[in-house]
Image (spheres, coloured by chain):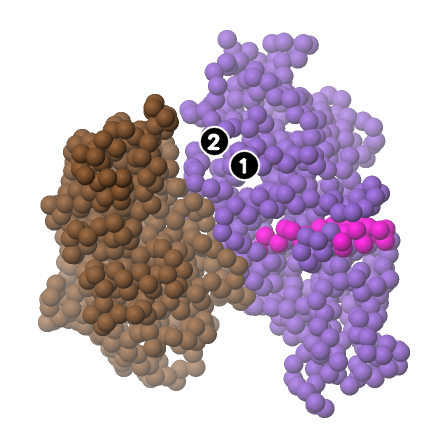
C-alpha cells in the first residue's frame, strides 16, 4: 500500500537567517513512502544497531518500521513557522554574510522521522535547530539514515534523534606549504569534513618550504617564496572560494601564519625580515627566524595581519609560535647587543616572548582572537585571557600534564597530540585515535570545560594531492566521533561496524576513503 | 628538423630502432635527472637536440626482423609518442599477437640527427622505448629536448614482479590496468595476480561458476569475467608484462568452499562437525578431480608458462580434528606428521600442473616439508626480516632450487617516513653461498597484500615505493649502492609518473611542475 509521507524539517535559526531571535525555521520534506517490513541487506558481519550513523548522535531511537523514499516525490521545504524560510541562503546554497557559529547550542538539532498521529497517512520527517548550522548537521544525519536495497530503492526507518556536539572545536589541519595542495583537493576535503561534522579547517597555509598565499599587500612573498609564482599559489579568489565553500558547509576557516620560526620561505620575498645568521664574525648567508629587533619587522607584521584579518573572516587566527631555533639568534651580534640592552641575559626565550607579545598586540588591534601552539604558553608569554592554547607535544602523559597546566592557568585549550594523522603505521591505527579523549587529564570540572575540542593534523612532509584523501579518511572520522559524540561512546566493535559503512558511504560520494580491513563496498571507488 | 625512430625486431634476431634528429646543436643548460631504473651503461653529453612532435616518427630499421605489423611495437610506438609528448592527446592501444614477454637486452644511442635502438626481442625494444621516453624533457616554454646519449642496457634479474591481492579487496579492472602501465614505466615484467584467497573468490571460472557466484564479495559487481582476465593479459602483454596467476591452496581457501561443497575439510569439535571449515580436504579423490579440472582451465586462460600454487600458512588444527583425515593419515602411513599430508597434497597439485606443461612457483613453506617437488619449481621467499631471509636463500639455493625474493618488499607494511630507502638497499644476492647458488636467484617481487588496500589507496601506496625495488632488480648493484644519490633521480621519476597520470606519492617535501589534479 502506498501512502504519502511528508518530511518536515523544522529549524529554529532566525537570528542568523532573518536577524530575528526566538522564531522558527521549518523545513518540510514531502515524499511518498511505502511501508516495508523486509530487512535490508547487511554490509558487515555484525551490524550496529545504530546503522551507519557517524559520528553517533547524542540520543537515537531507531525503530524497525521503515518507509520507502522516492526521489520524484521527495522534497525538502521550510516549515510555515520557520524563521529561515526559502530566502535562507545557507539552506538554499546561496551567498550571504553569516559565519559558522562557535557555540555548541547553536549546532544542536533534533530530528523526527515518523508517521505522526496528526498525519497518519502522510509520513514526514521534522528537523528542528536553533541555527542554520545545526540544520546542516541535521541534514547530514538525515542522509545517513537513508539506506539502499540491492535494487537501489531507498528507505528510511522511523527514528528520533536529538543531537549536539560534545566539543565546539572539531578541526582538521592541512599543510599547504610542504606540498602545494590544489584547490580541488581542499574543496573535496571540506566536503568530507562536513560528512563527518568537522567544523574547523585549520589552514597551515605557509611554512619554511613555501609561501603559496598570494598577499595583495606583499605580492613578493608568493612571487619569490612559492614553489612556483603562478601554478603553486592561492590567489585572493582561491582563498575566497575556499572560505565560502567551507561556510556553506558550516565550516570555519582558521588560517595559520606561523612566526617567528618556520618562516624560511617568507624571507625570499621580504628582505631583512629574517635574522641573518653569522658564522664567526661574518654573515653566513643563511637566515634564521624572523628578526625580532627591527622596527621594520613589526611594521611589516602590522600591515600583513591587517590584510589577513580582512581576508579571513573568522574571529580567530592561528599565530603559530612553535619550534623556534635559537642558534641563529645567538650567532648574530646585533641580536646579542639587543639582548644586553633589554636585560634578557642569555635567555633567548625572553627574546621570543618579546617578539610574540608585540605580535599579539598587533593582532589584537585587528580585533581577532588568536590561537597559538603550546610553546608560547610554556615560555610564559603574556597572553590575553581568551587565547586558545594548541597542545601538540609529547607522549600521552606529557600532553595530559600540559592540558592540566594550561587549564589550571585558566586558558582554553585544543588538543592535537594524539591525532597527528600524518604519522602512519601498519594496521588499524584509527583505534588509537578513537580511544584518545581530550578530557582525560587530572583537573577540576571547570578545567575540563576549558577544553574546547581538538584537531587532527595532517602535516605535509609526505602528503600531497596524490595521497592526502585516503590518508585522512576514514582515520580523521575516528577523531570526528570522539569530538562530537558523548564521552561514553567507546565501543570499538560498534564503531568498527558503523565506520566501515560510513567509509563506504564516503566512497560512494566520490571520496577515496581507504578501507579499515578486508571487506568490500557495494560501490567501489571509481575515480581511478 | 625531421625525426624518425626505427626498429628492427624479431624473436631471436637483432632488432633496431632508429630515431633521426636533424637539428642545430645547442648547448644544454638542463640537468638531466636521468633514467629510472638506472641503465647498465650510460653516457650522456651536454649536447642537446630539440624534438618537434610534428616531425617525429618511429620506424623499423631496414634489416630489422620486426616490421610494420608487429603489433607489440606498433602499439608501443603510439603509446610512447604520447608519453614523450604529453601535451598531445593520448592514443589507445589495440592488436595482439601470440608472443609472450620473455627476455630483454637493449642498446640505445642518441646522437645528432638520429637515435637508434637495437634489441634482441620486441620486449627489449619496449624497455628501450621506455628509456628513450625518459630521456626527453621539456624546457619552460614546453619545447622538447633530448641529449646526446649512449646506453647499453639489460636487466640484472629476469623476474621483476609486483603482487596485487584482489581477494581481500576487489580491485576494479581499471585499477589493475593502470598499475600495469606504471609497472612498465619502472620496467617491471611480471604481474603476480593473487586473485583469490580466504575473503573472496572473484575469478569467474567457466568450469565452476559457483566459485565466484557464491564466493565473491558480490556475484555480479565484484568478479573478474573471462573477458576481464583476457583484457588484463593482453594489456600486460603489450607492455611486456607476464601475468602469473596464483591459486593458493590448500590453505587460504575459505572462499572456495562456498561454491564447491565438499572441497574444504570439515572441522570437528569433539565427535561432531563444528560447522566451520579448514584447508582443502586432501583425503578425498574428488578434491584432486576438482583441482585437475580447475587448473586445466586456469592453464589455458593464463598463457604464461609459470603458475603460482601458493602452499603457504596451512593450519593443521582442522585436519587434526577431522576423523576422516586422521584415518587417511593412518592409511598413508604419515603417523601424526601433518607436514607429510601437506606435502602429499602439494605433490599432487604440482603433478597436475606439470602435466599441463606449467612450471610451478610455490611459497617457501612448501620447501620446508618436501623433498620431492620437481627441480624446476621456484620457491618464493616471503618469511623473515633481513638475517632470516638471507638464511632461507642460502638454505634453499643450496638444495639447487631456484628462488624468488619477496620478504624485504612487503610494501603493504607502511611506516612513517622514507621507507623506500629500505627497499632500495636490499641485496638479493648477499647471502652465504657459491656463485652457482647466487645464480639461482631469478629475481624478486614487491607484494601489496590487500588487507588495508583497495582502489582508493593502491596507487599512492605502491608508487614510487615499488620503483625503489624496481631499480634494485634491474640495475647494477655497484652503480646503485648510494641511496642519497638515488633520491633526486627518484624524485624526478616520481614527477614523471605524475605527468603520466600515475598517482605516485611524494618522497619528501617539494613539488612537481605538474601536480596531481585528482582528489
Relative horizontal placement of residue A448, taking residue B290 as reference (left or right): right
Mark 1 secondary-structure assignment: helix
Q: Which quarter of the figure has residue A91?
A: top right
Q: In this rendered view, identify the residue nearer to me: A229 or A423.
A: A423
Q: Residues within 10 Å of mark 1 (few under 14, many from 20)?
A: many
Residue B101 lies within the magenta run: no
Relative to B133, is A433 above or below?
Answer: above
Q: Please name the residue shown 83% across and 32% down the image.
A: A20
Q: Are marks 2 and 1 in contact (CB under 8 Å)?
A: yes
Give coordinates of residue A398: x percent, y percent.
Answer: 72, 56
Q: Please name the residue shown 60% across and 46% down the image.
A: A432
Give coordinates of residue B63: x percent, y percent.
Answer: 10, 71
Judging from the image, mark 1 belongs to the subunit labelled A
Report whether residue B349 is seen: no
- Which chain has been coloured purple in this picture? A
Q: Please name the residue shown 47% across and 26% down the image.
A: A42
Amino acid at each position: 500500500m502506498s501512502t504519502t509521507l511528508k518530511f518536515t524539517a523544522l529549524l529554529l535559526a532566525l537570528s542568523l537567517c532573518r536577524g530575528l531571535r526566538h522564531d522558527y525555521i521549518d523545513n518540510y520534506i514531502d515524499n511518498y513512502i511505502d511501508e516495508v517490513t523486509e530487512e535490508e541487506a547487511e554490509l558487515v558481519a555484525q551490524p550496529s544497531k545504530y546503522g551507519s550513523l557517524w559520528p553517533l548522535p547524542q540520543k537515537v531511537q531507531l525503530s524497525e518500521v521503515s518507509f520507502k523514499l522516492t526521489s520524484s516525490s521527495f522534497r525538502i521545504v521550510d516549515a510555515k513557522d520557520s524563521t529561515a524560510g526559502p530566502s535562507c541562503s545557507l539552506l538554499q546554497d546561496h551567498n550571504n554574510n553569516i559565519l559558522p557559529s562557535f557555540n555548541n547550542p547553536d549546532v544542536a538539532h533534533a530530528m523526527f522521522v515518523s508517521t505522526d498521529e496528526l498525519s497518519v497517512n502522510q509520513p514526514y520527517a521534522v528537523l528542528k535547530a536553533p541555527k542554520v548550522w545545526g540544520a546542516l548537521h541535521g541534514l547530514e544525519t538525515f542522509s545517513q539514515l537513508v539506506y539502499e536495497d540491492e535494487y537501489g530503492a531507498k528507505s528510511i526507518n522511523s527514528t528520533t534523534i536529538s543531537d549536539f556536539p560534545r566539543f565546539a572545536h572539531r578541526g582538521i589541519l592541512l599543510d599547504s606549504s610542504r606540498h602545494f595542495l590544489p584547490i580541488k583537493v581542499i574543496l573535496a576535503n571540506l566536503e568530507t569534513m562536513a560528512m563527518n561534522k568537522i567544523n574547523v579547517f585549520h589552514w597551515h597555509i605557509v611554512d619554511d618550504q613555501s609561501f603559496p598565499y598570494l598577499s595583495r599587500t606583499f605580492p613578493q612573498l608568493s612571487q619569490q617564496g612559492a614553489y612556483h609564482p603562478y601554478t603553486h599559489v592561492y590567489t585572493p579568489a582561491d582563498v575566497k572560494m575556499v572560505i565560502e565553500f567551507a561556510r556553506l558547509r558550516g565550516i570555519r576557516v582558521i588560517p595559520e601564519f606561523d612566526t617567528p620560526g618556520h618562516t624560511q620561505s617568507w624571507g625570499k620575498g621580504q628582505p631583512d625580515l629574517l635574522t641573518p645568521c653569522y658564522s664567526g664574525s661574518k654573515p653566513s648567508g643563511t637566515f634564521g627566524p624572523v628578526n625580532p629587533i627591527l622596527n621594520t619587522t613589526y611594521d611589516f607584521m602590522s600591515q600583513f595581519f591587517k590584510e589577513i584579518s580582512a581576508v579571513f573572516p573568522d574571529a580567530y587566527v592561528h599565530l603559530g609560535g612553535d619550534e623556534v631555533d635559537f642558534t641563529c639568534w645567538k650567532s648574530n651580534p646585533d641580536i646579542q647587543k639587543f639582548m644586553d640592552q633589554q636585560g634578557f641575559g642569555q635567555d633567548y626565550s625572553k627574546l621570543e616572548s618579546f617578539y610574540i607579545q608585540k605580535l599579539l598586540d598587533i593582532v589584537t588591534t585587528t580585533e581577532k582572537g588568536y590561537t597559538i601552539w603550546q610553546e608560547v604558553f610554556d615560555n610564559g608569554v603574556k597572553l590575553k585571557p581568551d587565547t586558545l592554547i594548541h597542545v601538540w607535544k609529547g607522549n600521552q602523559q606529557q600532553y595530559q600534564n600540559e592540558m592540566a597546566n594550561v587549564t589550571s592557568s585558566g586558558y582554553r585549550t585544543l588538543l592535537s597530540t594524539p591525532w597527528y594523522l600524518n604519522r602512519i603505521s601498519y594496521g588499524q591505527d584509527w583505534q588509537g585515535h578513537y580511544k584518545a579523549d581530550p578530557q582525560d587529564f587530572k583537573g577540576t570540572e571547570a578545567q575540563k570545560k576549558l577544553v574546547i575540542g581538538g584537531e587532527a593534523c595532517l602535516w605535509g612532509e609526505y602528503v600531497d594531492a596524490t595521497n592526502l584523501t585516503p590518508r585522512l579518511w576514514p582515520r580523521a572520522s575516528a577523531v570526528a566521533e570522539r569530538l562530537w559524540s558523548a564521552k561514553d561512546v567507546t565501543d570499538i566493535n560498534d564503531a568498527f561496524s558503523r565506520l566501515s559503512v560510513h567509509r563506504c558511504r564516503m566512497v560512494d560520494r566520490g571520496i577515496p576513503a581507504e578501507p579499515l580491513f578486508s571487506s568490500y563496498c557495494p560501490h567501489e571507488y571509481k575515480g581511478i | 628538423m625531421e625525426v624518425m625512430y626505427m626498429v628492427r625486431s624479431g624473436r631471436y634476431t637483432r632488432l633496431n630502432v632508429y630515431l633521426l634528429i636533424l637539428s642545430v646543436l645547442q648547448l644544454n643548460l638542463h640537468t638531466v635527472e636521468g633514467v629510472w631504473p638506472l641503465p647498465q651503461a650510460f653516457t650522456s653529453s651536454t649536447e642537446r637536440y630539440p624534438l618537434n612532435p610534428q616531425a617525429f616518427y618511429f620506424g623499423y630499421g631496414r634489416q630489422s626482423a620486426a616490421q610494420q605489423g608487429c603489433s607489440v611495437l606498433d602499439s608501443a610506438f603510439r603509446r610512447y609518442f604520447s608519453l614523450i609528448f604529453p601535451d598531445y592527446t593520448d592514443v589507445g592501444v589495440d592488436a595482439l599477437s601470440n608472443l609472450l614477454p620473455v627476455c630483454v637486452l637493449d642498446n640505445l644511442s642518441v646522437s645528432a640527427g638520429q637515435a637508434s635502438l637495437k634489441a634482441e626481442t620486441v620486449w627489449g625494444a619496449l624497455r628501450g622505448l621506455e628509456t628513450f621516453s625518459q630521456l626527453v624533457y621539456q624546457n619552460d616554454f614546453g619545447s622538447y629536448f633530448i641529449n646526446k646519449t649512449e646506453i647499453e642496457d639489460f636487466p640484472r634479474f629476469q623476474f621483476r614482479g609486483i603482487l596485487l591481492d584482489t581477494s581481500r579487496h576487489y580491485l576494479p579492472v581499471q585499477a589493475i590496468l593502470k598499475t600495469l602501465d606504471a609497472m612498465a614505466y619502472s620496467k617491471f615484467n611480471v604481474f603476480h595476480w593473487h586473485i583469490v584467497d580466504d575473503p573472496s573468490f572473484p575469478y569467474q571460472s567457466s568450469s565452476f561458476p559457483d566459485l565466484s557466484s557464491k564466493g565473491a564479495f558480490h556475484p555480479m559487481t565484484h568478479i573478474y569475467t573471462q573477458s576481464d582476465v583476457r583484457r588484463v593479459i593482453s594489456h600486460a602483454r603489450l607492455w611486456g608484462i607476464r601475468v602469473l596467476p596464483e591459486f593458493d591452496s590448500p590453505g587460504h581457501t575459505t572462499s572456495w568452499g562456498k561454491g564447491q561443497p565438499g572441497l574444504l575439510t570439515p572441522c570437528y569439535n569433539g565427535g561432531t562437525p563444528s560447522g566451520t571449515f579448514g584447508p582443502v580436504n586432501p583425503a578425498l579423490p574428488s578434491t584432486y578431480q576438482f583441482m585437475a579440472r580447475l587448473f586445466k582451465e586456469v592453464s589455458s586462460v593464463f598463457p604464461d608458462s609459470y603458475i603460482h600454487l601458493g602452499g603457504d600458512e596451512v593450519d593443521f588444527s582442522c585436519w587434526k580434528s577431522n576423523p576422516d583425515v586422521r584415518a587417511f593419515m593412518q592409511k598413508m602411513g604419515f603417523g601424526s606428521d601433518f607436514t607429510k599430508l601437506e606435502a602429499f597434497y602439494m605433490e599432487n597439485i604440482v603433478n597436475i600442473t606439470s602435466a599441463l606443461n606449467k612450471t610451478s612457483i610455490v611459497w617457501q613453506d612448501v620447501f620446508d616439508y618436501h623433498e620431492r617437488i620437481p627441480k624446476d619449481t621456484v620457491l618464493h621467499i616471503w618469511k623473515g626480516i633481513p638475517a632470516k631471509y638471507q638464511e632461507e636463500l642460502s638454505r634453499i639455493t643450496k638444495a639447487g632450487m631456484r628462488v624468488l625474493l619477496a620478504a624485504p618488499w612487503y610494501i603493504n607494511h607502511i611506516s612513517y617516513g622514507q621507507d623506500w630507502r629500505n627497499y632500495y638497499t636490499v641485496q638479493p644476492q648477499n647471502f652465504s653461498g657459491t656463485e652457482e647458488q647466487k645464480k639461482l636467484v631469478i629475481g624478486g617481487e614487491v607484494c601489496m597484500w590487500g588487507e588495508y588496500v583497495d582502489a582508493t589507496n593502491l596507487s599512492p601506496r605502491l608508487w614510487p615505493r615499488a620503483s625503489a625495488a624496481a631499480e634494485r632488480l634491474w640495475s647494477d648493484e655497484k652503480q646503485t649502492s648510494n641511496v642519497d644519490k638515488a633520491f633526486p633521480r627518484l624524485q624526478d621519476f616520481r614527477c614523471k609518473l605524475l605527468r603520466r597520470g600515475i598517482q605516485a606519492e611524494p618522497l619528501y617535501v617539494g613539488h612537481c611542475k605538474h601536480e596531481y589534479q585528482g582528489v
